[in-house]
């Protein structure tokens, strides 16, 4: 299988890659993808991990710097580290039957965001991302922890419903399985950033 990353944004995106524990690190865990470009990666047959887009990044010639969203410790190559929320994740588990999903559990890059969850640009003039209610309020009902750590008591909240409305087939909270996980067999995948923009 392969995954092709397409950047249809008008700006550069820095994809991050985090393998699951014990899985092979791909492309050093991250790379730069200029606007209107693509990059293909070969996937091992039994691989699991996540991809996400980092935005607003600046790196020096040694690959040290930071990103406004999805930063992985200030490095271009994430080397197995995950991205700091908010980050929209594309999660894959490959095998005889592949499982994949898009997760907004750690936040979203959607600019339609309630005031309390907004992440502002460095100059404070525009919304660049949306934090999850869990990361902001740290309450069990938003994080699906403690008494809410099961699918019976952890239900959609007003905040998760905002994410679900924006992206109906993505995970909006931890137990959003029925409408959010998909399967495929022996497929190649495409991860598109800014899919709503035309090339």
Image (cartoon, rainbow, N blue to C red):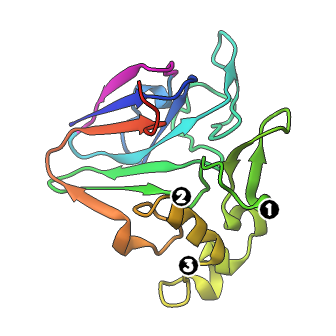
Report x, y in % for residue 17. 47, 37
Relative to 156, is 14 above or below?
above
Q: Is 34 colored magenta in this rendering?
A: yes
- Residue position for label 1: 116
- Residue 40 location, x and y as percent? 32, 25
Element marked by disc 1: helix
Q: For mark 1, does the 10 Å Cα neighbourhood hold few (<14), some (14 to 19), or many (20 or more) residues?
A: few
Residue shown at 53% from the left, 58% from the top:
104
Task: Please report whichever mark, 3 or 1, sits nearer to the chain's N-terminal start.
Answer: 1
**Most foreground residue, 61 or 111:** 111
Q: Which residues are magenta?
A: 32-44
As drawn, 17 above or below 142? above
Residue at the location (52% across, 65% down)? 165
Q: Position of residue 194 (x, y in %)?
A: 49, 36
Identify the residue under disc 3: 156
Cα–Cα span, label 3 and label 1? 18 Å
Q: Pointer 2: what residue?
A: 104
| Name of the residue lying farthest toward the front | 198
């Amino acid at each position: 299988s392969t995954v092709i990353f397409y950047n249809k944004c008008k700006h550069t995106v820095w994809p991050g890659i985090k393998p699951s524990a014990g899985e092979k690190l791909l492309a050093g865990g991250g790379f730069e993808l200029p606007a209107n470009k693509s990059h293909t990666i070969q996937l091992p047959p039994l691989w699991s991990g996540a991809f996400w887009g980092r935005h607003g990044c600046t790196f020096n010639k040694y690959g040290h710097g930071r990103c406004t969203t999805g930063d992985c410790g200030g490095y271009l190559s994430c080397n197995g580290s995950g991205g700091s929320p908010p980050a929209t994740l594309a999660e894959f588990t490959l095998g005889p039957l592949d499982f994949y999903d898009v997760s907004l559990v750690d936040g979203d890059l959607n600019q339609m965001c309630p005031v309390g969850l907004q992440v502002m640009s460095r100059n404070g003039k525009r919304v660049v991302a949306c934090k999850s209610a869990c990361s902001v309020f740290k309450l069990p009902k938003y994080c699906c922890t403690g008494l809410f750590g099961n699918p019976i008591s952890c239900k959609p909240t007003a905040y998760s419903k905002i994410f679900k409305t924006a992206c109906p087939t993505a995970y909006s909270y931890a137990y959003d399985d029925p409408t959010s996980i998909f399967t495929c067999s022996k497929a190649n995948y495409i991860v598109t950033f800014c899919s709503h923009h035309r090339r």
